[in-house]
Every structure is written in structure tokens, then in C-alpha cells.
Image (cartoon, rainbow, N blue to C red):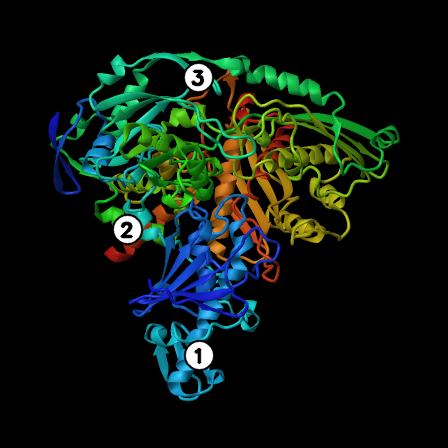
Amino acid sequence: MKANLSINEKNYAIDVPEAMPLLWAIRDSIGLTGTKFGCGVAQCGACSVLVDGVLMKSCSIPISFGIGKKILTIEGTSENLEFLRKAWHKENVPQCGYCQSGQLIAATALLDQISHPTDQEIDDAMSSNICRCGTYARIKKAIHEAVALKNNQNE
Amino acid sequence: MSNIQKISRRDFVKIFGVTSTGIILGCNISSDKKSFIPSSNGKTFSPNVFIEIQKDGKITLISSRSEMGQGIKTSLTSAIADELEADWRYVSVKQAIGHEKYGNQNTDGSRSVRTILEPMRKMGAAAKMMLISAAATKWTISVSDCKAENHHIINTKTHQKIFYGDLVDAASKVEIPADETIKLKKVADFKYIGKTLKSIDLTDFTHGTAKYGMDIRIPNMKFAAIARCPVTFGTVKSFQSSDAENVPGVEKVVQLDRIIPPVGQFFGALGGVAVIANNTWSAFQGKLSLNIEWNYGENQTFDTEKFKEVLTKRVHEKGKLVPGSKGNVVKAFDNAAKVIEATYHVPFLVHTPMEVPNATAWFQGNKVEVWAPLQDPQTARAEIAHFFEIPIENIIVNVTFLGGGFGRKSKSDFVVEAVALSKKINAPVQVVWTREDDVKNSFYHATSVQYLKGSIDKNGSVSGWLQRLAMPSIVSSFKPMSDYASGFELNQGFTNNPYKIENFRLENAKAEANLRIGWMRSVVHIHSGFANNSFVDELAFAAKKDPVVFHLDLIGEDRIIEGKSNYPYDSKRMKNVLHTTAKLANWGRKLPENHGIGIAVHYSFYSYVATAIEVSVINDKVKVEHIWTTIDCGLVLNKDNVINQLEGAAIFGMSLALFGKITTKEGAVEQNNFYDYQMTRMKDAPKITVKIIDNMNQLPSGVGEPGVPVIAPAICNAIFNAIGQRVRSLPLIDHGLV
Ligand code: FES
Ligand code: FES
């Protein structure tokens, strides 16, 4: 199947099997390897991307879901993603780093929806992302930190 | 690199080469020797760690250990930078390839910092002395009038300064300082060591640019998925591949024979049927479309439920006496005020690092190149040399970032698979395990059943302790018929039990291996930590004593027990972490309704860890509310990294306590993926408070693993404290408590 995908404001022409999930088009055909494979069955969130601003597990959606839409991966940028990156650095969040692409994208989706999430809202939004290294406490702290950074800048 | 080699008298550090951009210093580190710096003779000197100082001031350290989330690159670099008085911003780290020139590279057993810190520091100090000497010559002053500070050498009289980069040429002509003249900094003068440094890979981690094994791309490479027999060591009888070949993207289906390791070493590979495709997903799909008939072999009767019963029966009978037993437990039990017994069980577990096992290999005649996330790249290299009869110098093993390791990536079976396939199809190929493969065909952390019997005398002290262990041995993966836990395994919390007990008897019971047995983060300490701490809690309750007080008593008076290593066991440090944790958790306070608190203390990888855990139990569901952990790991390299590791260990320990369980039916693992082999998630994650004991004058000891063994027992003890129910068999989910 031939298709065009718009990822991080760039267009990519691909030719892949029709049933291929978006994840593998992004990783294997286009070569953006920042989006990770962790389970393949929508259980871990390592493959998280935003499709027209909606958080999706790219391992479990067909490419057709992404056609004609704007896809954001960890290689891209957005206002909230940049604040989150800063906060991630400040809190020294990653250990092995492998899950962090998905964590950052999921956190971006959260802040896009709720500008001042509570602990409970963070738990709810982030619990579909597994971190085997166990960086949860820092992720939570960093999300609050990102909100604070953004507020400071906007004052 | 030109071949200038200056060798110091003692031959510890030398200039390895002078390049157009700078000088490269090499030093020889042997991490397994008792003495930290071997005195090698000039001929055999082969540096295994390098620093390059460039003319633009940049300093690159080549790190020999694998990064898998434990922060090793950052920590070791900080040690060199500190002694070198380098500005941290100029320092970067390159990952070394797998090669014997780098010394032992096995990133296991929390040993990296422990063994190579001092040589690293010395190398930094030697480089600093050379820069000082170069500056002194330039200014024609004495070296004593120079000092190094923040990437500059300063003339202490005139306050003139020269940038490191500008001294590189002159420094390359300076004599290397002799080992005995190298002075290390005092603890009080440390600038980076013991402070907080952030991971030097942060930017890559937050932009998706860190390259893990699965991210390697070689022109014209293929992707492969392998169907392996669900029963350990089963073989292919026949297979039908037409459906698989019809999957778009699939190019070929080939059979892969099992690669059997020689007795005593290596891991080999399981073999199976491999689907070669032009992308990962097609390979996965093709694999699912295969029709394979297997010869299941002798392990097909293996059923973990039955096995648990067999082991339970065995530990209730007399086992093999283990050396180190002392006194007379029978007499102690006869004279006791109270005798209690308990049987503990830990199921099989699997590592599930976030990045599945994978490797990319390119077999080209008598040359092989590999890219893989490996904890032990040298074993991988040796396996390739052995199984494919390639001269070892023709094999390059590139170590990528590891998306978690936890022991899984010290076994190089997935590399052997990739090399075998590349040879077969004559193209570079990346073998990727699905998560299901990872759960079903791993090297499992062994199950165990333990029987404990203990007595309390009329003073309420422990007078006798009998412990029987049945646990399949790691040795079984290297030597068939190894049916008993081995000495090195027993030395993880059993024979070196930290308690002072007069009558102590340890027995070893038979336990066959019907799965490949491996090791997982903190290894056998998971078993000893769980049973010992649970049983001490039971004894404390029987003696009607506070668990912390009781535990402190049991550890006994201050004493130092010398062992085979440089690290004697110090009971004072053990008690200190326990005290500290109790204080941190405000032990003894009144808890909210439905809450309970439990404690555990364990000595592993030469570090001392105590953890208190508060849980709430509402409607029979346990929630871990707060974890307080204290560690004494001697000299701390990077404070924040230690905290990060202990936070991670708490979550890792929770996953195994709450959910961890691998079971088999008819020889095949029943679990599949994260939906039935569950992980702790953010909503379950408690508050975690970590305290590091300031003990900077002690040798550094393990950090990555010692935080794990205390978690399960502390949770179970807390549950007992809350609702009076003892959990003696993991995981909690089996008891309906999650
Ligand atoms: S890989 Fe998509 S959720 Fe795990
Ligand atoms: S940082 Fe390793 S899995 Fe999250």
C-alpha cells in the first residue's frame, strides 16, 4: 500500500503492507526509531504518538488511522513537550531511557488536555505507560515541574 | 593513531597514542583481581580504559561497561573528571566495543563501581599531573607553584592560567607519573564524586535519539522473528511455511538448529524456525502464520504447580547439610520456650526489560560484526568465535544502549541466533524477540521453596535456626544434572546469614531444572531476603517483641567478619541502616486505620539496606503507601544515581511481590505479555524516601541490586501488621490481595 504520512511537520511517502501497524511504518519504513516497541499489544505505552493531538498506541493502530493527519513523535516538538523535556532534565528522570519517549508523549497529551493536572489525574493518564526501571515518582514530579516552568514563563 | 607508547615504571597509565586532535591515555584495569591495579610488565601491558584529551579541551572517556539504566557511564566519568579537575561540560563518554582489551566487561553483580573506581581515579590524577608538569615547563616554574582548577592550570604566584586544551601538545611529551607518585584527592575535596550529576545521555533520552539494539539500521539488512519450541529444548519435527511466506514483506523461512553449548560455558541458542522479512512486523506476522510440529522432549511433563508440591515435600525432609552450619539445633528446639515453623515460596520470574532481546549481526566469510544491547559483550564474542569458528580478532561486538538488562542481557543467546541466521541467509539481519518470546523462552529466575524452623529461648531470643532450601541452580544452565543450589548461590544470604545465632543449620534439597535458569536483578538474594526477613518477623511476633528491636538483637553485637573479598561484613553498619530506616519511617507511631508497617534488612553485593514499608489494606486489597529505604554502600559516586537506583529497585521489588509469577503447564510457560505478567504501574507506585549513609571512606559497594531483596518481605510483614495475615508465598495477586 502506498501512502503519505505527515510526521513532525514533514511528509513521508511509504509503501508498506496494508495491515502494518503505524509503529512499524514509523520505525522500519521511515526510520524514526525514537518511538519504541515494548509489547505490541497496547499494554506498555512505549510506542505512544499523538495523531491529530490524540494519544495513540502506534503498535495497535493501522497506518490508515494516520493518513491525512498530523503525527507527533518524540523526534518532534510542541510547546508542552519542550517544557516537559526541560523538567525531565531537571528531575533527571530517565534510567535506561527506553520507555521515556512514550512517557514524554503521554505526558504531552496530558498537559494538552489538562493544564494543571492533580496527582490523581497524572496517575490516571500515565498508568498505561510501563517503566520497568521504575522512574514513576520522578515522572510525576517532572510533570508538575513542567507546569510550573510554563507558568513562570507566562507570568 | 600513531604508535607512541610511553610506559611508566610501574606501567599503570601510559600514553597510548598521539593523534592530530589530542592525546590518548590508557590504563590497565583488571576488575576481578583482589588488588585493584595489577602490576603488569611492560610487554603485556594492554590498556583497557582510555581518556582522550583533545586540543579543543574536550575530554572523552571510553567506558568499558554497558549502560542499562544504572548510570554507569556518568558515574565512572565523574570519578575521572574529579581527579582531573575537569569542567564537567567538556567531558563525554563513548561506549567501548566488546573486547578483552577492556578487561572484564561483565556488567553484572553490581560490580562496576566496586571494582574499577580507584584505577579510574588514578588515571584522572595522572593526567592532571602531566598537564601541570607541561604548564610548569612552559612557565619555567616549579610544579608546586601550579594547580589545576576547572579545566585550567593556574600559576599560583601570578594567577596566570592556561586552558587544558592548549597544554595537550606539551603534555604528550611529559613523562608519565609513576604509580606510587599519584596522589588521590581527599573526600572533602571531591567536586563531582558523591555529588549529584545528571545522566550525560539526557538529551538523547528525551529526543528519541539514543540508539538501542533495536534501533540499529544497516543498509540492506533483514528482520527476523524466530518461533522457538514452547517447551525448553524441544526441537522442530516438521513445519509448513507457505502461509508465512504469503505474508507481505516476508522473504524466506529457514530452520535454525539448536546450538548446544559445551559443558561449563556459554549459552548457545534454542533454535526453531526463523521468518526473514524486510521489516519487523512482517517477520512477527510470518511467525504467527507458521505451522510447526515439535518434538517436545523430556521437559514436556514439567508443571510448576506439581513442582512446587515436590519441592515442598523435599524441604520437609532432611536435606544435604551445608558447611557453615554450627551448634545443635535439635537441642535448641528441645530446650526452647517456643518453636515455630514456616514454609516460603517464590515462583519462577522473568526480567522483561522494556527493550526485548534483539541483536543485529553481519556474517561475512570469516568476519562477523554484531550490534546488540549486551551486558556481557565478551562472552558474546567468545561464543561467536566458538560456535562459528571465526578467529576472535575478526569479530566486532558493538554495544548499544540497553533498554534495561536486569540479567537477561548477560546471556548472549539472541546474538548467537542473529549470527547463525546471517550466515544462513548471507545478509545482515536483526533478530527481534516479541514480548511473548521474551516471557516464554527466557533464562528464568529460579523458583524456590524454603522451610524454616526456629526457636525462642526463655529470654525471647532466637536460640536455633534451621533452614532448608530447594531451588533449581543457575549452574544447571552450564552443567546438566546440577540439581542442588551451588555454593555461590548459597553464599547469597544463606551461608552468610547476617544474624548471630548459636545453633544454626542449613540444608540443601534437590531441585531439578526443567527451564533454562538464569539470574535476575539481585539474584538469589530475592529468596534469602524474603524468607529470612519474613521468618524473623514471625519469630519477633512469637517472642512478643517489636520487629525492629528484635532484628537489632538478632544481628547482635558489633563485629566484623572477614570474607574472601576486600569487603568484610560489619554488623554495626547493618544495625545502623536498620536504625536509620526506623527513624526515617517514624517507626512505632500510631498508624491510620487499616494501615500496617513492616521492616526488612538485608546485606547483599557488600551493601547494607534496610527498608520499611507502610501499606493499607482495604477490602482485602493491598496498597503500598510509602517505602523508606536506607543504604550504606560505602563511597558514593553519584548521589542522585544511587537514589534513582533505589527508587527503581523498590518498584522492581514491588512488581515481583505483587504480580511476579511464571508458571508452566506441560512444559510450556503460560504467561504471554504484560497483561498476564504484570508490572507495577504509576497508579500503584508509592512515595519513596531514600537515605544514603555518609560513609565516603569505605570502599564503594553495590547499588543497582541491593534495594530489591528487602521489598517483598517488608510488604508482607506490613500486611501482617495491618490484618494479621501471613503471606508466605509470592505473589500477592495469588492471594486476592491485589
Ligand atoms: S508497544 Fe505499543 S503499547 Fe506496548
Ligand atoms: S527508564 Fe528504563 S524502562 Fe523506563
Q: Residues within 10 Å of mark 1 (few under 14, many from 20)?
A: many
Task: Tell me the chain of label 2.
Answer: A
Q: Amino acid at mark 2?
A: Phe
Q: Quadrant of residue B2?
A: bottom left
Amino acid type of the residue that numbered disc 3 sits on in the rendered structure? Thr
Left or right of B100: which side holds B543? right
**Which mark lies nearer to you, 3 or 1?**
3
CA distance separating discs 3 and 1: 66 Å
Residue at position x 34%, y 74% in the image: B169
- Chain designation of label 3: B
Q: Position of residue B285 (x, y in %)?
A: 28, 21
Determine whether the beta carbon of the residue marked 3 sits less than 8 angstroms from the nearest atom of ligand 1: no
| Residue B683 locus on image (x, y percent) | 43, 35
Question: Residue B235, labelled with which disc?
Answer: 3
Q: Residue at x 17, y 23 (%)?
A: A18
Respond whether the residues carrying marks 3 and 1 are from the same subunit.
yes
Q: Which x, y percent locates residue B619?
A: 53, 24
Q: Nearer the viewer, residue B190 or B430?
A: B430
The label number, if any, that marks residue B133 in the structure image: 1
